[in-house]
């Protein structure tokens, strides 16, 4: 075996192991954490689509941009270095998806990851709407039923009637919004967030100014102690 072949085999084993660990992490996640993972996956795709890259169509361009997984891995490392490892979850979904499309030997892991994400509820899309609106990319947000070309699930069932109508991003203190905020808080607590503001910033995908926090804090503070696994 030549050095190049040994290196390729070793790299494939490393990528397979990383994809497997990510898969296990979402297989064992509570529903609220799975919903948050899906929401961040949708948000990351919306951000990149706003910059001209459609991640759901990766299968059509990934082979001419084989460096793309390395770009995502760099983004993840930067988030972790900045003390924001929880923000890297959505990027990780796309890291493993892009690798699965490039390397047939790990394609199964990519499909299994999307099989698990398919179990996310409507709350994932509501959370994604909130985060995308705050990031200014709501126009690019896709429905959670979508799966990247090449990683389709042959047994996936799509109930179009269950897709919620697009609503406004404001966090209103009504029953429906309280349920969304509580789901977000549960997921944030699971990821180690210690305060209502931490949970809000995680969900919105960015830090809030003190003025913004004054605007948003009421439902987050009110639901912080009510939200439990």
Image (cartoon, helix red, strand yellow):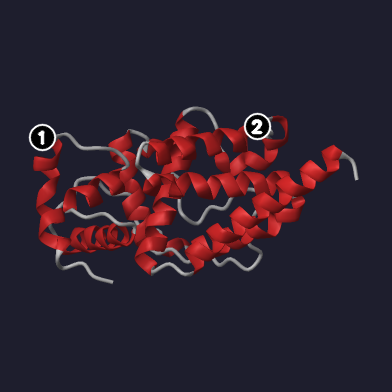
- Name the residue located 38 percent from the left edge and 62 percent from the top edge: 33
Contact, CB < 8 Å: mark 2 with mark 1?
Answer: no
Which class describes the residues within 10 Å of circle 2: few (<14), some (14-19), or many (20+)? few
Location of residue 125 in the rendering, given as x and y in whole percent from the top left corner: 37, 54
Location of residue 30 in the rendering, given as x and y in whole percent from the top left corner: 39, 69
Location of residue 225 in the rendering, given as x and y in whole percent from the top left corner: 14, 65
Name the one closer to the observer, 203 or 139.
203
Q: Is residue 187 visible?
A: yes
Residue 31 position (above or below residue 52): below
Q: Quadrant location of the N terminus? A: top right
> Based on the displayed image, in which of its 4 quarters is residue 106 positioned?
bottom right
Q: Is residue 219 left or right of residue 163?
A: left
> Based on the displayed image, in which of its 4 quarters is residue 60 positioned?
top right
Q: Is residue 139 left or right of residue 14?
A: left
Q: Is residue 104 left or right of residue 34?
A: right
Which class describes the residues within 10 Å of circle 1: few (<14), some (14-19), or many (20+)? few
Disc 1 element: helix
- Name the residue located 20 percent from the left edge and 37 percent from the top edge: 208
Residue 157 position (above or below residue 114): below
Residue 31 position (above or below residue 81): below
Residue 20 position (above or below residue 8): below
Location of residue 185 in the rendering, given as x and y in whole percent from the top left corner: 25, 59
Q: Quadrant location of the C terminus? A: bottom left
For disc 2, the marked residue is 67
Q: Residue furthest right?
A: 1
For disc 1, the marked residue is 211
Earlier in the chain: of badge 2 and badge 1, it is: 2
- Name the residue located 43 percent from the left edge and 63 percent from the top edge: 120
């Amino acid at each position: 075996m030549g050095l190049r072949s040994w290196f390729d085999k070793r790299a494939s084993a490393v990528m397979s192991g990383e994809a497997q660990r990510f898969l296990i992490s979402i297989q064992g996640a509570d529903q609220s954490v799975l919903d948050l993972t899906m929401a961040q996956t949708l948000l990351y795709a919306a951000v990149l689509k706003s910059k001209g890259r459609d991640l759901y169509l990766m299968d059509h361009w990934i082979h001419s941009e084989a460096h793309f997984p390395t770009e995502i891995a760099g983004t993840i490392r930067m988030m972790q270095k900045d003390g924001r490892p929880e923000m890297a979850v959505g990027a990780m979904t796309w890291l493993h998806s892009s690798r699965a499309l490039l390397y047939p030997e790990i394609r199964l892991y990519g499909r299994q990851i999307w099989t698990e994400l398919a179990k996310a509820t409507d709350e994932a899309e509501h959370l994604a709407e909130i985060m995308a609106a705050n990031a200014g990319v709501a126009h690019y947000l896709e429905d959670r039923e979508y799966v990247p070309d090449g990683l389709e699930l042959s047994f996936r069932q799509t109930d179009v009637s269950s897709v919620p109508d697009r609503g406004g991003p404001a966090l209103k203190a009504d029953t429906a919004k309280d349920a969304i905020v509580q789901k977000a808080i549960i997921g944030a607590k699971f990821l180690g967030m210690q305060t209502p503001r931490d949970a809000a910033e995680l969900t919105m995908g960015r830090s809030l100014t003190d003025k913004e926090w004054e605007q948003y804090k009421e439902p987050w503070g009110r639901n912080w102690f009510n939200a439990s696994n």
